[in-house]
Image (cartoon, rainbow, N blue to C red):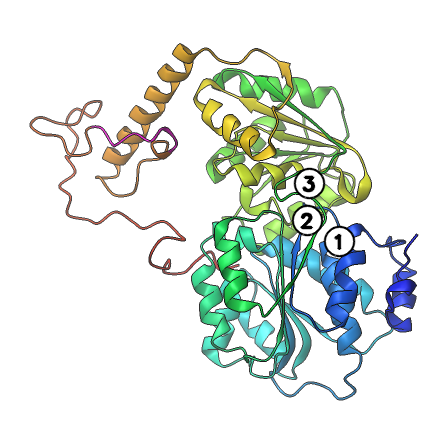
Amino acid sequence: MTTFADLGLSPKLLKALEGTSFTTPTPIQAQAIPQVMKGRDLMGLAQTGTGKTAAFGLPLLHRLLDITHPPGPRNVRALILAPTRELVQQIYDHIFAFTKGTPVKLTMVVGGASINKQSERLAKGTDVLIATPGRLIDLLERGDVRLDSCGYLVLDEADHMLDMGFIHSLRQIAKFLPLRRQTLLFSATMPKDIEEIADTYLRDPVRVQVSPPGKPAEKIVQGVHFTPQGDKAKLLESYLQKHPGEAAIVFARTKHGADKLAKLLVTWGFNAVAIHGNRSQNQRERALADFREGTMDVLVATDVAARGIDIPTVRHVYNYDMPNVPENYVHRIGRTARAGAGGSSVSFCAPAEMDELKQVETLLKKTVPVIGGAPWAMDAVKEANALKVARAQQNQQRRGGSGRPQGQKPQGQKPQGAKPQGGKPAGKPGGARPQGQKPARKAAGGSAPPRRPARG
């Protein structure tokens, strides 16, 4: 059996590992660490929960320990980019444990926290900067940090970075980095855009893949329960009552939906809390801390938190709403069965979500076992999809025609009644007709960058 000592890591790092839960290297660690220590660019592909942070963190620290002088003012020696605040915090916590007994200095910067305090911490320079793209750009624009002497770049959860529209931020940050550097890219899935990023930013990379992209951990017991949309809350209650006191994460599609569901669960006697992008950094940290410590049993989250929650005690994941992006299914259920433990996931599928379920099964290359209800008949699916489109059109008309109707793209249907000819839009008597004077808002990740893309 391979050990961390066999990989040639510094004695200081081996000493630090003695106080952690890391005993033997995982497959991604055993394959990636030697290549990174050699100075090779690397593309690592592995599902969530397989130990990717140590796979790049340990060899990176090993190389930095060879440098005996401190970094210059506002300088950074190694940059690690991650798409969410939770993921940045998770990476920081892991790498901080590895640095015990070493002179390596870590700094974390994310949105939602005081930028002035972050600037003060960066003033004397840092060995490793772990950041969300938005906040890093803020600091670069202020001149509070320099990347011209940064010799290492790590892109963690690169596919999620693309999903959140950070490709433009990445291009902007790359302009501040030296061409001669070592670049590591880690991802759980392999869409075409990731290959293009690898071709752009990596030089002759070694490719390390320990499982097919998009494949969830084998120890996760998956299931789907078919239920009408209006019955989901009571169904969730019945599932949660089967394992009182056990940590569970429930994924909702929208921020409003997450808040509403968490409040409902609290009224039913569950210790529940919501976490999403509209919560402040302090609120998000407090919610995760309460969940980690067991004060809260149920965490209701949106996809923004799907890759930043590394809590080994999570045994159950519920997809209250099916994900719009099939790859997000893998990351959602990957919040359980961490570090080799077991776990279960249950997806609630309403008639209008059959397309999303099929996309997930296509990604998995297998069907998700049915544990409740029966697959919806085509008539029910068509009726539900038509209702979903009608509601989306009504919502668009209430907004005066601004914004893209939600729910139309999965069915491949063109907006009906978006430009009413004669008379007022159906379902909105007396309401103002959209005049087409305001351009539709562009979605993040489109042809033009968002004004301020999800600042960490």
**Label 2–label 1 contact, CB within 8 A:** yes
Residue 44 magenta-highlighted: no
Q: Secondary structure at mark 1?
A: helix
Q: CA distance from mark 3 to mark 1?
A: 18 Å
* Residue named by callout 2: 46
| Among the 4 quarters of the image, the one containing residue 382 | top left
- Left or right: where 403 falls relative to 358: left
* Residue named by callout 3: 335
Q: In the image shown, does 412 or 73 lie closer to the viewer?
A: 412
Give the foreground label among 2 and 3. Answer: 2
Q: Residues within 10 Å of mark 2 (few under 14, many from 20)?
A: many
The residue that appears at 9% across and 29% down in the rendered structure is 421
> Could you tell which of marks 2 and 1 lies nearer the N-terminus?
1
> Could you tell which of marks 2 and 3 lies nearer the N-terminus?
2
Q: In the image shown, does 116 or 310 lie closer to the viewer?
A: 310
**Label 3–label 1 contact, CB within 8 A:** no
Q: Secondary structure at mark 3?
A: loop
Q: Residues within 10 Å of mark 1 (few under 14, many from 20)?
A: many
Residue 360 drawn at (x, y percent)? 55, 31
Range drawn in magenta: 410-416
Image position of 309 with respect to 173: above or below: above
Q: Main secondary structure of the magenta part?
A: loop
* Residue named by callout 1: 28
**Amino acid marked by disc 1:** Ile
Q: CA distance from mark 2 to mark 3?
A: 14 Å
**Label 2–label 3 contact, CB within 8 A:** no
Q: CA distance from mark 2 to mark 1?
A: 7 Å
- Left or right: where 170 falls relative to 309: left
**Amino acid marked by disc 2:** Ala
**Amino acid marked by disc 3:** Arg
